[in-house]
Image: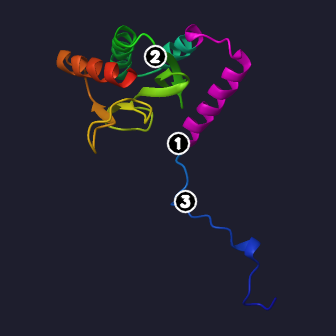
Amino acid sequence: MNGSQKSAKGTAVTDKTSEGFTADERAAVKERAKELKAAGRRGPRAGKADGESDLLAKIAEMPESDRVMAERLHAIIKATAPDLSPKTWYGMPAYARDGNVVCFFQSAQKFNSRYATFGFSDKANLDEGAMWPTSFALTELTSADEARIAALVKKAAA
């Protein structure tokens, strides 16, 4: 190599603005890995109680405003769709049917957002024409919001 050429090894990119995962995203992936490992240890006989205790522990860690919404959503989902199994998913409270997440709650703190999110996966039975919403921003829960969520969860779990 002459003086103007450099080895490819010596030109590693140290740019902090790369398009990789953020620290919050990396933390969520690590949480998902822990969830899968724990589920593997519990085995196929693990029931709703294990998932629910994990979910309630995650809710307890949330800031008060998100915790209040998550607790209320948990009660709504249990009452509206008792067949959905509570679990955690990327460190978020989620509810699954046959092991597949149908809906989830994401605390505003999770990714430093200005609002919490209640969302549905592609396993939710919400299809309506060619376009339908799959997530909702939440800053609080009114009784009208709770009724709408209950109806959506019932439809999603059907």
Q: Marks 3 and 2, how far apart in space?
A: 41 Å
Give above or below for 123 relative to 21: above
How would you rate the neighbour count of disc 2 (Cα within 10 Å): few for under 14, some for 14-19, many for 20 or more?
A: many
Question: Where does the C terminus fall, quadrant-wise?
Answer: top left
Query: Which residue in the structure is indicated by mark 3?
Result: 16
Query: Which residue in the structure is indicated by mark 2?
Result: 84
**Label 1 is placed on what type of residue?**
Glu
Frontmost residue, 18 versus 151: 151
Q: Residue at x 36, y 38 (%)?
A: 113
What's the magenta bit mostly, secondary-structure-wise?
A: helix
Q: Which residues are magenta?
A: 25-50
Task: Specify whether 58 is left or right of 139.
Answer: right
Q: Marks 2 and 1, how far apart in space?
A: 26 Å
Q: Residue at x 44, y 21 (%)?
A: 62
Q: Which residue reaches farthest left?
A: 144
Q: Is residue 146 magenta?
A: no
**Residue 41 x, y percent position in the rendering:** 73, 19
**Residue 127 x, y percent position in the rendering:** 32, 35
Question: Where does the N terminus fall, quadrant-wise?
Answer: bottom right
Q: Earlier in the sequence, mark 2 or mark 1?
A: 1
How would you rate the neighbour count of disc 1 (Cα within 10 Å): few for under 14, some for 14-19, many for 20 or more?
A: some
Is disc 2 placed on a helix, strand or loop? loop
Query: Which residue in the structure is indicated by mark 1?
Result: 25
Q: Residue at x 42, y 27 (%)?
A: 104
Q: Earlier in the sequence, mark 1 or mark 3?
A: 3
Q: Is residue 48 magenta?
A: yes
Q: Given contact means CB atoms under 8 Å apart, are the residues at marks 2 and 1 in contact?
A: no
How would you rate the neighbour count of disc 3 (Cα within 10 Å): few for under 14, some for 14-19, many for 20 or more?
A: few
